[in-house]
Image (cartoon, rainbow, N blue to C red):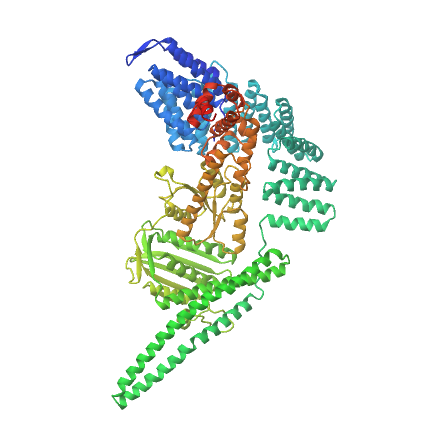
Amino acid sequence: MKKERLNRAVLYGYFLLFSLLLVVPVTLHSQTFTKKDSIKIFSYIQKAEDFYNLSEYDSAVFYTTKAEKLAKEKKYEIGYAHALLKKEDIFINYDELDKAEIINKQVTALGEKLNDSKIIAYATLHTAQIKMYQNKMNEAIPLFQKCTKNYFDQHPSYHAALAYNDFGYTYGLQDDLINQTKCLIQSIKIYESLPEMYNGELAVVYNNLSLVYYRLKDNDKTIEYAKKSIYYREKHGDIDNLALGYCNMSQLYRQIDAKEAKKYQELCVKYAELSKNEDRIAQAYMTSALIASDAENRTLAIEFEKKAVKILEEKNNNPSLLALRYIAIGMHLVALKKNPEEAISYYNKALTISEAIHSKTNISEVYKNLTKAYTLQNNYKAALEAQKKYYTYRDSIIDEKTNVSVAELEKKFQTEKKEQEIKLLSAENKLAQKQKYIYIGLAGFLFLVGFTLFFIYRNQLKTAQKIKELNTLKSKFFANISHEFRTPLTLIKSPVQSLQKVISNEDEKKQLQLIDRNANRMLELVDQLLALSKIDSGKLKLILKEGNVSSFLHTLTEPFEFQAKENNLKFETHIEKNTTHQYFDKDILEKIVTNILSNAFKYTPSGEKIEFHSFIENKKLKLICSNSGISLKKEEINQLFERFYQKNESEKGVGIGLALVKELIELYEGEIQTQVTNQNLQFTILLPLEKFPENAVVVTKEATPIIENQTQENDLPIVLIADDNADIRTVLKDLLNGDFQILEAENGEDALKIAKKEIPDCIISDIMMPKMNGYEFTKAIKSNELTSFIPVILLTAKTAEEAHLEGLQSTADAFLTKPFHHEIIKLTVTQLIKERKKLQERYSQELVLKPVDIVINSVDEKFLEKLQEILHKEVANADFSSDNFASAVGMSRMQLHRKLKSLLGVSATEFLRTERLKTAVELLKKGNGNISEIAYSVGFNDVSYFSKCFKEMYHCTPSEYLEKNA
């Protein structure tokens, strides 16, 4: 997020000179400071500026602290304010925003006390920049407006131009391109009005303006301002940045003017080679390869790619890019239809690297191109194997559904279940017959003799007792057999799933999928039998909790939208939105809605329509579900709610789903009405919302998990929710609010941008999203070193186990299906965050213990080991700054800072300083030199500053440490 700042030494010199002219001997609080004191204070500030421009962070902060202490001692408030401003500027530039905010409050208060408009303006500018880097754009914009309007518009300067450039940058982050353009143009006007030319700064602003018009798709303006940026880069004389500008121009012209593209490509190569910057040279060669490829000159493209590869192999700091270059060379060789063996060797190199870095995208691309190379070789067997692996890594397991034999197997299954049900109910039928005979006999006995009344009454009691006992036995039987079914079903599914992984024959796979699908269907029936047995035994209670009914119904109907597309059905939902909350049993309502809709989807022919309506009427929840294309008579309606009812042997039975629905509605003390008109079957369900049934348990306040050590709202973990359905986002937000800070995104691309900026503690993502789906989003999160440690929970309407497997293969941490259980998803988020915090504590401990010899498995621990190796080589290098550190790691300074902050709780600078001090302790213990020699050998230029840092870390000076450990 942080923009690169240019050298401001000359301008700051003017700033100091202006400040010194204001200095005269003054007495404050009965103490006098002299001009000599003020000169000394500002000389410290100038030293800090010099070190700051050399990227010497520690030294710059050290001298601002000296200036600050001296000014405070002499009670010289203007000098104190300037020292704080310089320190704040350093902290902002190095992304120490927490420290900068503390100083900012002091400077603002001091400026208001002195009534100094200049100090107030600079403090306000710093506040705006802090808010901008914290991604609080709505707070940053008014602050930029305030400082520019109140001061910088009347006092054009370098900082005024810088303020407008940052102002425009803020508008750009909010996609307000019009205001961004206005601010950038104003920044240019100020720079050009100043007596001294700021060529480097103008180049940056014109480049930003070019990017604005690129986003607006205005090619003419884009190129116009890009050329102006190059003009000022040429005047500035920075060869490296000039090469970058030519490279950008070449890319812009690729689709517009091939001749111009080639011209700038040649300039890019020329200046990149002059710069001696290997990264820039490699970039120039890769751009040249693209231009050559556009011109169908693949031989030249290969030549440039090989030059780039040579540099990347020597540097060995970007394996992913190196693998892509190997692939590019292979593709060019295949396109030339020459030497496929060489192409295959490059593909194999790319495969080795990609497997080492676990880049499934690159592996997939390699196998895709290996297929073509082997085909060119006429090695069709190898081509076929490569193609199979390509499909595997592409995570697109072909699931060709077949209807062959499904109807027969389903009919057989239902027949067997019906026979079992007949056997189970035979005793009940016999008892019903006996009861009929008893009633007939009773009528006769009433006419014949009165004394038989006692006998009949006794028989009725016995019959009732037997029926009750039979119902109890039946419920126990259902419960026991349902539990017993789970074990053999599990033993069926387990080997089937194992065979699916190893069998390649498509026909055999289809048969295994059929077995697996019907095993899942049996599990559903087992669950329904368990629910019915609980109702029959009176053990099922209503658990009423407060919630939003409309939002909950949206989560239940969303999975059926996906099913409707697969089955070629028209599915429409009309759910009345309401903001009030009601008490209802989420589990019971879920069973009622899912069974009603499942029944509709099961019996609605392809191309027909299903509708679902929901609204609140007379303090009752009214649900209406209708489906067309049904051949059902009115006299058959009541039989729909009979368990395993089947109209005739040629048609499917209804199973026990509708019977379960009716039982649940009666438990809820609700109503269900059924009607058939013009081949349209409609169910109308009424459930009470305010009249609580006698068997209900009302939960007035849900217990929520508490994250340890969090007392303030800003300390709450951040959860990013990515889902294109606004209602789903609302449900999740309401569920997690209070315990987490919530960020939202409506597609994968936006979610990825937010994740890189905000670094959330956990991500909940849908799978089916526009622009970038959940699998691609998860892979992007996990493959980026900046975000690889963030746990990802995938949500999906797909219930197939292939979808579950695909989610886990994309390295997601958890996979939940819709409709989801609220407590499960909340506890899953909480547990994942707790595990990450434990990992952070472990890393922090390892940082102190210096884990060079520890066996490391995770990506982040390997990253730390890489840092330790770099530091081992560079610890004695005094010029090795955080910028050099970031370059060696292969990240930007900002990315390295955020990564270390997330893993260890320290900045890059603090990490460097700590490692240098640890090395110094080892040298002190071994007696390798005196204190000054050791200080210089671990990268400290100033011995006094070394002693200060040493005391802060070990609570004693180096001399005292030697005495203690002598």
In the image, residue 786 sits, relative to residue 36, either above or below, namely below
Q: Toward the viewer: 857 or 480?
A: 857
Q: Farthest bottom residue?
A: 448
The mark tally for this picture is 0
Q: Position of residue 1 (x, y in %)?
A: 47, 31
In the image, residue 957 sits, relative to residue 834, either above or below, namely above
In the image, residue 539 sits, relative to residue 121, either above or below, namely below
Residue 152 visible from this viewpoint: no
In the image, residue 805 sits, relative to residue 892, either above or below, namely below
Horizontal side of 666 relative to 878 (left or right) equals left
Q: Position of residue 782 (x, y in %)?
A: 52, 42
Q: Position of residue 152 (x, y in %)?
A: 39, 20
Q: Farthest front residue?
A: 966
Horizontal side of 701 relative to 748 (left or right) equals left
Residue 226 visible from this viewpoint: yes
Q: Position of residue 615 (x, y in %)?
A: 35, 56
For the point 49% across and 36% down, the residue is 846
